[in-house]
Amino acid sequence: MTLSRVLAPPLSSLPICIPRYYGGVVLVGAGSLALNAYFTMRVMKARKEHNVQYPMLYHPTNNLFNCIQRAHQNYLEMLPSFLMTLFIGGLRYPRSFAVCGVVYLLGRILYFRGYSTGDDT
């Protein structure tokens, strides 16, 4: 038996315990990806409406497009932290984290809708 076998047993010998109701956590995670697809489509639509060609991220003068683009980017910036927190925390408290995840996603929808109006006030 090698030293590496003693210090790090094969992964097949480690028990994997997925709690009951963890499927709700996975559904919320999938919902976050669906929400990302929706935000992406909104940005693509805004690119066509405001004639912003790739690779430009922002329009020099069009604040409305810039707000839509920035709202989507902000969502993408927070997505890895959200998913890690959701999936790791959901291992211990699956129902609580699933509910909190849904509330977070609803908040992101409201944020996107408000921020993408282009109103600075």
Image (tube, rainbow, N blue to C red):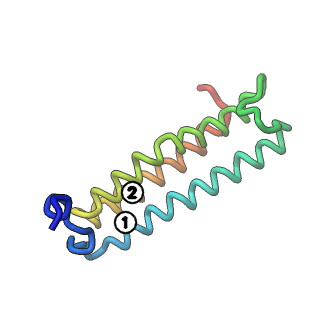
Image quadrant in which the C terminus is located: top right
Q: Which residue is mark 2?
A: 101
Amino acid residing under circle 1: Val
Q: Quadrant of the N terminus?
A: bottom left
Q: Amino acid at mark 2?
A: Gly
Q: Nearer the viewer, mark 2 or mark 1?
A: 1
Location of residue 94 (image quadrant): bottom left
Q: Is residue 7 left or right of residue 12?
A: left
Q: Is 91 on the left or on the right of 86, as rendered?
A: left
**Could you say which is closer to the camera, residue 8 or residue 67?**
8
Seen in the picture, residue 63 relative to 104 is either above or below; the reply is above
Comparing 79 with 105, the one in front is: 79
Q: Report the residue at 45% width, 61% height from top.
A: 29
- Element type where label 2 sits in the image: helix
Residue 109 in the image, given as x and y percentages of width and height: 54, 50
Q: Residue at x 75, y 48 (%)?
A: 44
Q: Dot 1 corresponds to which residue?
A: 25
Viewer-proximal residue among 93 and 99: 93
Q: Residue at x 47, y 54 (%)?
A: 105
Q: Position of residue 34 (x, y in %)?
A: 57, 61
Q: Earlier in the sequence, mark 2 or mark 1?
A: 1
Residue occupying image coordinates x 30% and y 57%: 88
Mark 2 vs 1: CB contact within 8 A: yes
Q: Is disc 2 surrounded by few (<14), some (14 to 19) or many (20+) residues within 10 Å? A: many
